[in-house]
Amino acid sequence: MSLPADPVDLTGRVQPVNDRPVNYDGKYVLYWMTTARRTRFNHALDRAASWARSLDIPLVVVEALGLNHRWASARFHQFIIEGMENNAAAFAEAGIQYIPFLEKSPGDSKGFVEAASQEAALIVTDEWPCFITPKIVAGLGKKSAVHVEAVDGAGLLPVRAVPKVFSRAFHFRNWHKKNIDPHLMALSSAKPLEGLQGKNVFDEKILDQWVPLSVEQLTNPSSLISSLPIDQEVAPVSVHPGGSSEANRRLTHFIHHVIDRYGEDRNQPDKVATSVLSPYIHFGHISTQEIWEQACRADAGENGEAFIDQLLTWRELGLNFCHYHEDVDTWESLPEWSRKTLEEHAEDTRPVSYTLEEMEAAETHDEIWNAAQRQLRGEGLIHNYLRMLWGKKILEWSSHPREAVETMVHLNNRWALDGRDPNSYSGIMWCVGRYDRAWGPERPIFGKIRYMSSDNTARKLRLKPYLEQWGVDPSLSM
Ligand SMILES: Cc1cc2nc3c(=O)[nH]c(=O)nc-3n(C[C@H](O)[C@H](O)[C@H](O)COP(=O)(O)OP(=O)(O)OC[C@H]3O[C@@H](n4cnc5c(N)ncnc54)[C@H](O)[C@@H]3O)c2cc1C
C-alpha cells in the first residue's frame, strides 16, 4: 500500500526540528500550541490540519502553560488561561480534541511530550524567535518519538525570508516593499478547522496523569492561579482580559472608530488612539495578518498607512533582529557608535539617580515618569509615547548605561503584558541607540543618543487626564 502524500509547504514557514520519521500508523496529528494561541489565521494550525487531512486521521491540540520561566506571574497566567477558555470553545464547536494543560508545580509536565508522541503521526508546533520558545521547540524535537515540525507564524513575512539583519527601519521598509508580495499570497486560513475529523483519540491514561484544565477552571481560574509558585505581586489586570474574542472586539472597534485619527492622535494620552493590541499579538491571541487585512480594507489613507507601518515595519524589524541574534538584550548587541558614546559619558555626574527598587515603586521626583510606571504596574501597559520617555529617563537616572538596560528589561518584562517580545527589545534598545542615529548637541550622560525630557513632553502632550488617573499612587488614594 502506498503512503499518503505529505502536504506541500507553499509558505516557506515550515522547519523540521528533528530527523525522526513521520509515523504513518499514528492515531492523530498533534499540534503543540505555544505562541500562536488562537484557532484562526494560524500557520502552524493550518499545517497540522493539512497533515491530518492528508493522513485522514484526527487532529489533537495541546496548549500547555509552564511555570518554569523567568517572569512567570499571576498576570500572564490569567491572560493566557482566559485565551484558553476561548480556544476550548472554538475547538469544541469544531469537534477537535483540545487539551489545555497547566503545570501546577515545577516538573509536573515531565514526560508529557514523550507520552503524547507515542501514538502521534507527528508533532507540529509554533516557531517564534524570542524568549523561551526556541528552547521549547528544541526540547520537543529531542523528547518526541516522532517527527517534529516548527512553523513560523510570527509575522507577515517568514523570518527566514529576510536575508540579513536590518539596522535601520527605512532600509527594512524599502526592502519589504519590494519583497513582501509573494508572502501576502500565502496567508493563513480564516477557517482552518473545516473538514477535520473530530474524535477524542488521545490516550485516557495520559490524561489521567497530565490532567487538562476543566471548563470550570478555565472559566474561573483565580483561585488556581493564586495557589501557583509564580510572581503573585504582578497581579492580573481586569481592564485587558486575555483571549481571541477580546482581541477581535478591539480590532473591530479600532477599525470602525479609531484608525481614522491614528496618525494625528496616537501620541496623545488623553484619548486612546491606538489599537491596544500588543498583549494579544504577543500571546498569539490575534494574528498580525488579520489586523493587516482589516486595516488595508479600512482604506484609512495616511492614518491607515501610519498604522500599517508600525505593525509591519517596526514589528517585523524586531522579529528580524531576534531571528539573527540570541543576545537581543546585551550591551554588545547595540550598534558600535551608541556603545562608544554612552561609554564616553558613563562616568558623567548624574544630577539625580535612583535604585531599581525606587524606580519599580514609582518613587522618583518626576510626576510624569511616576505616572507611566504606575500605569505599567497597574494596567500592564504604558501609553506609547510615554514609553519612550520612560526608557530615556531610566538611562538618565541609572549609574551606568548597562545598568539602565538591565533595569528597563526587568521592569518591562516583569510588569508589561506585552513584554518578553521582540518589540520589547526593539523598544528598550531604541532608547539607547538601536535603529537610531547619532544626534546633536552632545549632552552629559546621553552623549549622542537622542534625548527626551519630561518638560518637553509636558509641553507637547495633553497630559491632564493621564496624570489625574495615574499621578497618584492608587494605594494612597483608598
Ligand atoms: C522602552 C520601550 C519598551 C517597549 N516594550 C514593548 C513591549 O514589551 N512589547 C511591545 O509589543 N511593544 C513594546 N514597545 C513598542 C510600543 O510602545 C508598543 O508596541 C505599542 O505602544 C503598543 O501599543 P498598541 O498595541 O496600541 O500599538 P499600535 O500603535 O496600535 O500599533 C499596532 C502594533 O504595531 C506594533 N508597534 C507599534 N509601535 C511599535 C514600535 N514602536 N515598535 C515595534 N512595534 C510597534 C505593535 O505590535 C502594536 O501592537 C516598547 C517601546 C519602548 C519605547
Image: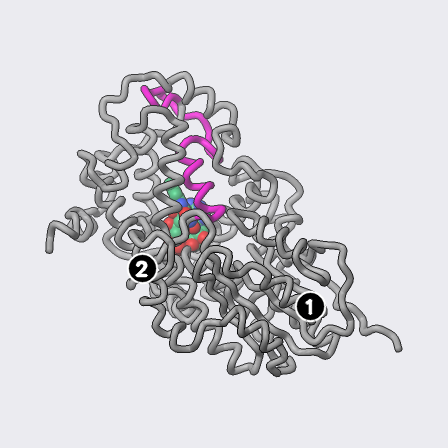
Q: Is residue 3 above or below residue 426?
A: below
Residue named by callout 1:
118
Q: Residue at x 39, y 46 (%)?
A: 413
Q: Looking at the magenta stretch, what is its main secondary structure?
A: loop
Q: Quadrant of residue 409?
A: top left
In the image, which residues are magenta? 420-447
Q: Quadrant of residue 58?
A: bottom right
Front-most of residues 92 and 168: 92
Image spot of residue 184 (x, y percent): 62, 60
Image spot of residue 292 (x, y percent): 50, 60
- For mark 2, does the 10 Å Cα neighbourhood hold few (<14), some (14 to 19), or many (20 or more) residues? many
Front-most of residues 302 and 19: 19
Left or right of residue 157, residue 432 in this image: left
Type of residue at label 1? Answer: Gln
Q: Residue at x 70, y 76 (%)?
A: 27
Q: Quadrant location of the C terminus?
A: bottom left
- For mark 1, does the 10 Å Cα neighbourhood hold few (<14), some (14 to 19), or many (20 or more) residues? some
Local SS, label 2: loop
Q: Quadrant of residue 3?
A: bottom right
Residue named by callout 2:
236
Type of residue at label 2? Answer: Pro
Q: Is residue 88 above or below residue 125?
A: below
Q: Nearer the viewer, mark 1 or mark 2?
A: 1
- Residue 386: say if magenta: no
